[in-house]
Image: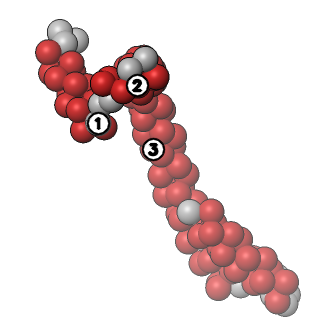
Amino acid sequence: MAKQLKSIEDEILRLLASSEGDILEDETLINTLAVSKETSAVINTKVEEAKVTEKEIDEARTSYRPVAFRSSLIFFCIVELITIDPMYQFSLQWYQNLLSMGIDNAPKSE
């Protein structure tokens, strides 16, 4: 989107620099300005939509942060169990199954 705005801006500047006489009578320049205004409005709308989407994604990501913290804590505790006794060595697959089972059995939130 920024590239598109930049190219339109460059085109307008090129037309302004190369125009001779009254710029208000230059049809190419007037048409380019009209198109650039429409394109700018469309791009600004998309930028606003992108900001809203980004905010929603950030909120969703933030809601999972406590789960990620606890999952990480459990994982590193399990990894350190091997220092107590080699018998306590578990695979990543085992941990993933444990985590999935914990998520499945947890009370559902609204």
Residue appearing at x 40%, y 25% in the figure: 82
Check contact, mark 2 vs mark 3: CB within 8 A: no
What label does residue 49 carry, if any? Answer: 3
Q: Which residue is mark 1?
A: 91
Amino acid type at circle 1 is Ser
Check contact, mark 1 vs mark 3: CB within 8 A: no
Q: Quadrant of residue 40?
A: bottom right
Q: Which residue is mark 2?
A: 82
Q: Nearer the viewer, residue 48 or 22?
A: 48
Q: Is residue 64 above or below residue 38?
A: above
State the count of labels. 3
Q: Quadrant of residue 13?
A: bottom right
Q: Nearer the viewer, residue 35 or 75?
A: 75
Residue 14 percent across, percent down from the top left:
78, 83
Amino acid type at circle 2 is Ile
The answer to whether 99 appears left or right of 74 in the picture is left
Which class describes the residues within 10 Å of circle 2: few (<14), some (14-19), or many (20+)? few
